[in-house]
Image (cartoon, rainbow, N blue to C red):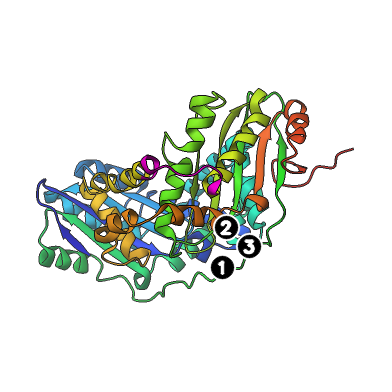
Amino acid sequence: VVSVKSDLPLVSFTLAFVGGATSFEPADKTGVANFTAQMLSEGTASKSADDFSNAQQLLGVSLLSSVSNESATIGFTALKDRFDGALALATDMLLHPAFPADALERIRGRTLVSLTQARDNPNAVASNVFSTVNYGATHPYGRVMTEASVKATTRDDVVAFHQALFRPGRAVITVVGDVSPVAVKASVEKALAAWPAGGERPRFDYPAPPPAAARTIYLVDKPSAAQSVFQLGHPGPNRYTPDYYALQVMNTLLGGLFQSRLNHNIREEKGYSYGVGSGFSYGRGPGAFNAGGGIVTAKTDSALIEFMKEIRGVQGAIPFTDDEIRQGKDALVQSLPRTFSSVSGVRGAISGLYTQDLPERYYQEYAAKVNALTRDDLVRVAKQYIQADSLAIIIVGDRATIEAPIRKTGIAPIVVLDANGKPVLTP
C-alpha cells in the first residue's frame, strides 16, 4: 500500500503482520514473542550486532521491531535518498536474523530482573491479576510472562517463532512519503524477492472467557503502600462490534478525557488521585473493559464508591448533557488531523486499516458516524457492555489499612489474592 506525501523528503516504511503472540507463541513459553522482537536487532548472518547498529547510524535510521498479541511490525522512517539502504537493512533483519545465543542470555537476564521489579510494582501486579481473574491462565488473553516461562525459552524457540510468524502470506507492506508508487513497488519487490512464499492469516478462534462471576473485590496486599491501585472491569467486545463508535464516545465521557467524569470527580473534585480513566482494549477477541488508577490509601473506600457511582451514572443515573456529548464527539473527531500530521502517522493509520480488516473508507466516514450518535445510543452501550454487577474489582494496596473500610462499603465481597492471582488462605 503506497501513499504519496511529498511535502518533506521523508519515507516511512512498515512490514506489518496479521498475527502475533496469541497465535504463534506456545502457551508454556509466554515471552518468546517479546524475546524475538528484541533479538531481531541483534545482528544478521552477515552483520554483528555492532555492525548492524553502525549501519543504521550511517543511514540516520532506527529500525524498529515489535510483536504484540495479534500483530507484529518491522519498520523505519528515512530520508528519501536513504530509503533503499534502509530497506536493505530491514530485509536483512527480516530474512537473515542471527539470534545470537549471548544476546538471548543478556535479554533473559534483563527480563528476569524486570519480572522481579514488577513484583514490587503495584501497577504491574494489578494488570497481571486483572488478566488472570478475568480470563484464566489458559486463555490467550490471560497468559502472563513468568520466571519459569522466561527460563524455559531457548534459541530454538525464538527461531521457530520467527519462522512461524514472519511469512509473506500474512504481511501488509505500507510505504508513505516522497516516493513514486511504481518505483517504490519495484524497490520493495526486488528487496524481498528471496522471501519464500507461504503463510496464511490466523483465524483468531479464541475460546470464550470463563463465565462472569458476581461482582467481587480481589484484594492483593502491598504492605505500607502509599496508594491503592484499582483495576475494575471484565471481558468485553471485539474490535468489530457494530457499537464501536458509540462505545468510543461513551468511554471518552466516562474515562477517556482528562475532563472525563471519572477523572473530574476523583482527581479534580475529590483529590483522591493524580489521574484515573477507563477504556476498552478491543482486539479480535473479547478485549477487556477496564477502569482504574492510583488512589491515595486513606481514600480507597471513598474512591471505590465514586467509581461505582460514575459507572452507574453513564448507564442513565446521571444523564449526559448536550455540552458533554458535543465535547466527547469533538475530542474524537478533532484528533484525526494529528493522526495524519506526519509520514509515520499516515503510515500507521493506513497499515492499521489493512491489518485489522477495516473498511478503506473508515477515516472518511469516522466523523459522520461519531456525530450521528444520540444520547440514547451512549446509554444503551454503557448498559450493554459494562456489566456493573459482574465487575472484577482488583485493588492492590495496604490490606491492613484498606480491607475493613472497603468491606464496610458493601459494594462486593472480598477475596484476598497473592501477586500471582492465587487465593490467600485467611483465618
Query: SS at mark 2?
Result: helix
Foreground mark, 3 or 2, reads 3
The percent coordinates of residue 194 (x first, y second) are: 28, 71
Where does residue 302 sit, x and y in percent of width and height? 65, 29
Query: Dot 2 corresponds to which residue?
Result: 141
Quadrant position of the C terminus in the picture: top right
Q: CA distance from mark 3 to mark 1?
A: 9 Å
Does the residue at mark 3 contact the one at mark 1 (Cβ under 8 Å)? no
First-in-chain label (3 vs 2)? 2
Confirm whether the magenta stretch covers residue 320: yes
User: Is 421 on the left-hand or right-hand side of 127?
Assistant: right
Q: Are marks 3 and 2 in contact (CB under 8 Å)?
A: yes
| Disc 1 secondary structure class | loop
Question: What distance separates the C-alpha of mark 2 from that of mark 1?
Answer: 9 Å
- Residue 90, visible in the rendered structure: no
Asked whether residue 324 appears in the rendered view, the answer is yes
Q: Which residues are magenta?
A: 316-325
Number of other residues with Cα within 10 Å of mark 2, as a class: few under 14, some 14 to 19, many 20 or more:
many
Residue labelled with disc 3:
209
Where residue 206 is drawn, which disc sits there?
A: 1
User: Of circles 3 and 1, which is in front?
Assistant: 3
Instruction: Check disc 1: other Cα within 10 Å, few if <14, some if 14-19, many if 20+.
Output: some
Q: Marks 2 and 1: CB-CB under 8 Å?
A: yes
Q: CA distance from mark 3 to mark 2?
A: 9 Å
Residue in front for this viewpoint, 381 or 420: 381
Instruction: Give the crowd class for mark 3: few <14, some 14-19, many >=20 residues within 10 Å.
Output: some
